[in-house]
Amino acid sequence: MNLARQTDADATPLDEAARAAWLYYVGGKTQDHIAKELGISRQRAQRLVSKAVAEGMIHFRLEHRLASCLELEATLKRKHGLELCRVAPSLGEGTDPTLGIATVTASEMERLLGSPDPIVMALGTGRTLRAAAEELPRMHCQHHKLVSLNGNISPDGTASFYDVIMRIADKVRAPHYPMPLPVVAASPKERDMFHALEPIQRTMKLARQANVTFVGVGQMDDSAPLLQDGFLSQAELLNMQQAGAIGEICGWIFDESGRYFNFGPNLRAAGVRVEPKQGNLAVAAAAGATKVNALRAAISGGIVNGLITDEPTARHILEK
Amino acid sequence: MNLARQTDADATPLDEAARAAWLYYVGGKTQDHIAKELGISRQRAQRLVSKAVAEGMIHFRLEHRLASCLELEATLKRKHGLELCRVAPSLGEGTDPTLGIATVTASEMERLLGSPDPIVMALGTGRTLRAAAEELPRMHCQHHKLVSLNGNISPDGTASFYDVIMRIADKVRAPHYPMPLPVVAASPKERDMFHALEPIQRTMKLARQANVTFVGVGQMDDSAPLLQDGFLSQAELLNMQQAGAIGEICGWIFDESGRYFNFGPNLRAAGVRVEPKQGNLAVAAAAGATKVNALRAAISGGIVNGLITDEPTARHILEK
DNA sequence: CAAGCATTTGAGCATATGCTCATGTAGTGA
DNA sequence: TCACTACATGAGCATATGCTCAAATGCTTG
């Protein structure tokens, strides 16, 4: 009953954590039991299990769609003419909804990447997509292509933490085309200089041909991600708010009808502008009270024809 | 903070279980918390969570390969010339290893079914594969084909519980070709009558062309599955044991060198005989001390060129 | 309508889990 | 070699989980 000898062979501490988590979740054993079996203290067993969870080694997947979520999905699809809609069960009003929609977004990505026909998947940036990347399983998708819609270079030259495409490409082993660009350039002139570069032109062309596009959605209230990440000054934000700015996708700002502005920071937006396209799928993944208006605008303006959100947000979007 | 209103919309009790499990595993909340949020008693919350687990709604997946398992896999591949080898971490000597190898088998099937090129996957029957079917996620595999290697009709005419192909086809939405046959016919003559039927001939032909084959392995000791399921009499079993029978795949009995017998019950075996084939993959999924000899024989005889097992079994197979 | 059966419920309790803190230990630099 | 830092360990305790049992509820059948 004692596996201590075998455990010795485990080189890394992560291995130990993985083994403990395996015994706990797959084997359904108590941590006490595991501790005895591995010849360690109970405390250590518990630390290993929670470490495995914290490191994201263990993934939970719910194989059951809730009736109430299905209903919201159907209503949203019908009322807004969406091609795709997924509603994650609420995690409770007090909890960050990112985790829930990340899980669901990952499962949709997995489904689409499972396609036998080669697809081009375009990806935005942001917290939500980044979290979804963590939830993706390992896959072998050599026949698909991943392409970035925008860069993730901050005004100070550092790369933002919320890089998505590299993480996803790493997980699913697909050829990938990142975009070495700022989200919003310093000036229209700088933007044009970037766009004049041949490799960037090629990547942008590929991104515009994407069959499937996943993007996050930024709100334009005082907590706007564009402000927080330093792409917009306080003054510019105020200006755009007064001009009726509601939301932003890949740095491109739009109003409550989902129409892009043709002035202000949009003249410097460096990434690909997500546009309504026939036959293709453009999915917005976002949740939270602050995002409701931006999501509603993006949907009604046809910037996206797919939506992944959570229950409370879905309800908010539906109630006028 | 109270979602009770929303919960009312949940029609089925399974929905409630799913929601509780979602909050517990994905949301990481305590059952106390969940109970308050859903407006139910803590007991009920705990019952719902364990129900969701029992119903197999929630799946655990470990995204980390243990060094010691990788090592066993490498050694087995090298020493026995295997194309594919996966070793699941042990669940402890006292525990049924089926769950562990089922999880790993499912993930290998998922990987293979994720292929963009159409494949034909042939499937045996048995407890292990049946358990693997439960662990498979939902997929859309219209471009692949699933085909059964043998039937699952008992001598008394009832279908055995361990039907695999229908379950898997249901999960992955692939065209499937079951085999309406007994595992072992009552007589060679009956077997030939079955085989004369045109639709059965077609299915068997397809099964023989399979790119990938997954089978369980039966031992031929006194606990032989063929005996337990009533396909073999006690006397026949004894006969075959004395003739040197070690194991069985799809009802076809072989000796310790992995050579099929050409007498006895094999003259009545109704399913497709798994054979060494160039370029194709035939994977045996089995674990446990009783299966070691059968596995070793099947591998060394080249009946299979792939193996999915657990750590203790892998060690046993390797030690001479 | 009522008795009988089966299933569901929550209270109470035993067990399992996770957190904190005091102590230990290994690695680092003077 | 000796402090010093940083991280690892296990004891003890607070909390969370899961099991048992008796009461309640609903459903079937005479």
Image (cartoon, coloured by chain):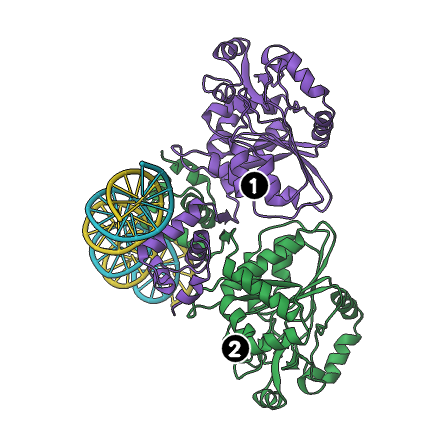
Chain colours: A purple, B green, C cyan, D yellow
Number of residues whose C-alpha sits closer than 10 Å to that of mark 1, classed few (under 14), some (14–19) or many (20 or more): many
Label 2: how many Cα within 10 Å (few below 14, some 14–19, many 20+)? some
Instruction: Choose top left, top right, bottom left or bottom right for residue B154.
Output: bottom right
Q: Which mark is residue B218?
A: none
Judging depth in this view, the residue of A290 and A157 nearest the camera is A157
The secondary structure type at the circle numbered 2 is: helix
What kind of residue is marked 2?
Thr
- Dot in front, 1 or 2: 2
Image quadrant in which the C terminus of chain B is located: bottom right
**Which element type, helix, strand or loop, lies under badge 1?**
helix
Q: Report the Cα–Cα distance between label 1 and label 2.
A: 40 Å
Do marks 1 and 2 share a subunit?
no
**The N terminus of chain B is located in which quarter?**
top left
Q: Residue at left 45%, top 44%?
A: B26
Residue B21 % position (x, y)? 43, 47
Residue depicted at x 55% and y 73%: B317
Q: Quadrant of residue B302?
A: bottom right
Q: Residue visible at 49% across and 20% down?
A: A224
Residue placed most toward the observer, B214 or B303: B303
Question: The disc numbered 2 marks a residue on which chain?
Answer: B
Residue nearest the observer in this picture, B162 or A68:
B162
**Image x and y of residue B194, in percent:** 75, 76
On the question of residue B60 being in view, the answer is yes
The answer to whether residue B41 shows anywhere in this view is: no
| Residue B102 appears left or right of B116 | left
Q: Report x, y in % for residue B225.
A: 56, 77
Q: Using the image, determine if residue B31 lies above or below residue A279.
A: below
Q: What chain does badge 1 belong to?
A: A
Q: Dot 1 corresponds to which residue? A: A106
Residue that appears at 46% across and 53% down: A12
Three-letter amino acid code at the position of disc 1? Ala
Provide the residue designation for mark 2.
B290
